[in-house]
Image (tube, rainbow, N blue to C red):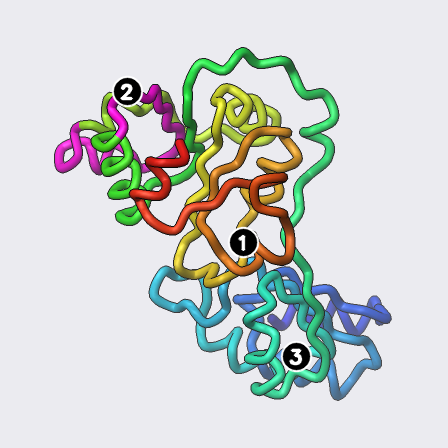
Amino acid sequence: NAHVIEVAQRFKPDVCFVLKGHVLHPKTLEVFKKNTRMKLVLLYPDNPFMFSNGNSNARVVNSLALYDVVLSWAQILQPVFTSLGVAHTCYFPFGYDERFFNDLTDETPAFDLGFVGTADDERALLLEQLALCADDLTIGIWGNRWHEYFNSKPVLKKLYQGPAVYKQGMVNLLRRAKITLNPVRLQNYTAHNMRSLEAAAAGVLQLATRTYEHEHVLFKEHESIALYASVDELSEKV
């Protein structure tokens, strides 16, 4: 924090753009406000109120009111920011890095449904239930931590294709399945996630959790996205 203060006082920027900022102390931002004229803008790509998964901490929440603008990836969080004293909030959805989507290769789908992402309890249960309900589907899973569930959910071992892949490799994996599964975590509430826009940019059929933003803000159901609200509905639509 001392180094950041020194650089800011020497550089004297008009705007300080903070990405996540979970290591910045509120006192650091107070120094900025007192000794410089720069505007403070925060983009927090995780849920700042979710401490349990390590995505945030008290420093972040206690600093919110010190920012001039907070960019929110979730519309539902904007009134919360305002109630905590944030002067201006702007809806700022996730996006994608176009460098990895310009030269899409023609992939012959090898799977009916694919999921690319890190395993957790909720995702492991969902994929297990889907595999058991629709055993005629070819399902491929890529990502980290899936081996932790092989003993308790052996069907996942049969679906597992490999570890996490990033950038262009991730895009190519999305295109290897007829359907890309996009389950939205609890921390994303009624909003969306990075995969929402990445799948769209990859030109694949996306089957995602039914959220307010998926259904009413970013996409049109049955035109640019397919949605589900339960395992039964997921299985039926697949």
For the point 24% across and 21% down, which residue is it? 158
User: Which residue is denoted by mark 2 in the rendering?
Assistant: 136
Residue type at mark 3 is Leu
Q: Nearer the viewer, residue 229 or 18?
A: 229
Q: Is residue 151 above or below residue 187?
A: above
Left/right placement of residue 45 relative to residue 38 reads: left
Q: Disc 3 or 2, which lies upstream in sequence?
A: 3
Residue type at mark 2 is Asp
What kind of element bears circle 2? loop
- Name the quadrant of the C terminus: top left
User: Which residue is denoted by mark 1 in the rendering?
Assistant: 192
For the point 62% across and 47% down, which residue is it? 220
User: Which residue is denoted by mark 3 in the rendering?
Assistant: 29
Q: Which stretch appears magenta?
A: 134-154
Q: Disc 1 or 3, which lies upstream in sequence?
A: 3
Left/right placement of residue 91 relative to residue 157 reads: right
Q: CA distance from mark 3 to mark 2?
A: 56 Å
Determine the image quadrant of residue 100. Answer: top right
Residue 226, position as x, y percentages in the image: 51, 40
What kind of element bears circle 1? loop
Q: CA distance from mark 1 to mark 3?
A: 29 Å
Check disc 3: other Cα within 10 Å, few if <14, some if 14-19, many if 20+: some
Q: Is residue 87 above or below residue 9?
A: below
Check disc 1: other Cα within 10 Å, few if <14, some if 14-19, many if 20+: many
Magenta stretch: residue 143 in it? Answer: yes
Q: Disc 2 or 1, which lies upstream in sequence?
A: 2
Q: Nearer the viewer, residue 197 or 21?
A: 197
For the point 52% across and 27% down, which residue is it? 174
Left/right placement of residue 86 relative to residue 184 reads: right
What kind of element bears circle 3? helix
